[in-house]
Image (spheres, rainbow, N blue to C red):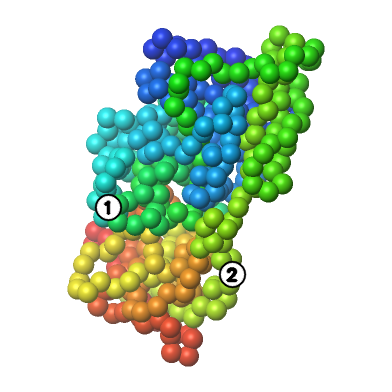
Amino acid sequence: MKRLCFRFLVLLIVGACFITACDKKNQSGVTKYTVVCDPETGLCWQDPQREAFNYDDQGVRAFEADQYCGELVLGGFDDWRVPTIMELRSITAGFEGTETDGACSIVDGDITYAESQDLNCFNRADGVTGNGPGDNGCYLKPGFTGTCDNPDPYSGGHPLEHVSYETPSDTDKWRGVLMFENGSVLFNHACTGVDVRCVRDDDGSPIVDCVEEEVCRPGETKSCECAGFGDRPDGIQTCNKAGDCWGPCECTKSIIDTSVDPECNRGNEFYDQADILTVNISLPEGDTIDYDPAVVSVFLYECPDENTNMPSRPPDGGSWENQVPDPGQPPYSMEVRGVTYYRERLIEGRHCLIIQMSQKNIMPPIPTSGDYYYWNPSQGIVFPLEGGAETVDVTLERIGG
């Protein structure tokens, strides 16, 4: 569906400051960014987020977001950065748990991954997705624009999350993210696809709109040269409202230096080498369900030393094709490869299966009554598999009896 972008000017009073928002596409069809400064926090934001209205964009990964914000030039400023998780929480609205004073325990500072599994951080009420009070149904404060429905190609179709610079204190493999489609906050793998909205500290400097005096048509754009990694795409200069001056060169695109984090760029090298576990999945004999499952997922986790509850963190093995939306009615058969989710390495040692068949395809995927699952920590599968392949049959168990 084609999205319409209307030309408008909105003045919103926040405290003693005016926040200005205008059309987000210039005359050449390129997304146009503005700067929104929030006097309550002393922060200035890129608005909207990176490639907000480009539905062909598949997001960036955390290290790519770091580079993107580091190279961003907008409003005459070049000191942009990836926000912290509390800075992101300062611009969300509509879900009390993750607003600035909310009870969610994921904050800036020392927090382990296990401590982040806090139900106060997850908005799991019915009908909340895309029904926030902000622009396009997002859980955004007034005065900010953007989208929250650009799908993540690696996660069964749920929207891209907004990345922060926050990592758990016990691992650097995860980043704090905020899901603006429902306001939830969690940690996810640093190699996952994400949105990013860059931020800078407001030092009181005015936003520059004139660097080259010349008669021009208001809103007209022209190309300008950007510095940065590789053969960086040109930026744009925009004619000011008075029609007598060009604004600064705005550099809002980057060519990513993939050597920064090669573990996120393995492609199919290990995937093609991985052993294959075939999992045949059925319901208990005599069970029937009165709903069409929204998603079924089959993943591998390192087995614990003793019986424990089913882990709620992202998987250790199995890739994104093992999370299948709209799978139809069971039984199912799925191939799970002995490779990490983002295919950066092969897995080794004893692993246990976690299988979920859920009525809702939402993040985070916490099971609810009526869903089905499988988790047996005493029955592990050792990788590499003997002969490179193995087949197992499992019977799901209904949650809630």
What residue do we see at 54% from left, 73% from top? 270
Q: Is residue 2 left or right of residue 188?
A: right
What secondary structure is marked by label 1? loop
Please tell me how many numbered marks the rendered image carries. Answer: 2
Query: What quarter of the picture does the N terminus occupy?
Result: top right
Depicted 51 relative to depicted 338: above or below: above
Q: Return the mark for residue 58.
A: none
Asked if 205 appears above or below 154 in the picture, the reply is above
| Amino acid tagged 1 | Thr
* Mark-to-mark CA distance, 2 and 1: 31 Å
Q: Nearer the viewer, mark 2 or mark 1?
A: 1
Q: Which residue is mark 1?
A: 112
- x, y percent for residue 77: 56, 27
Q: Reading the chain from its start, which is encountered first: label 2 or label 1?
A: 1
As drawn, is 353 to the left or to the right of 54?
Answer: left
What residue does disc 2 label?
A: 268
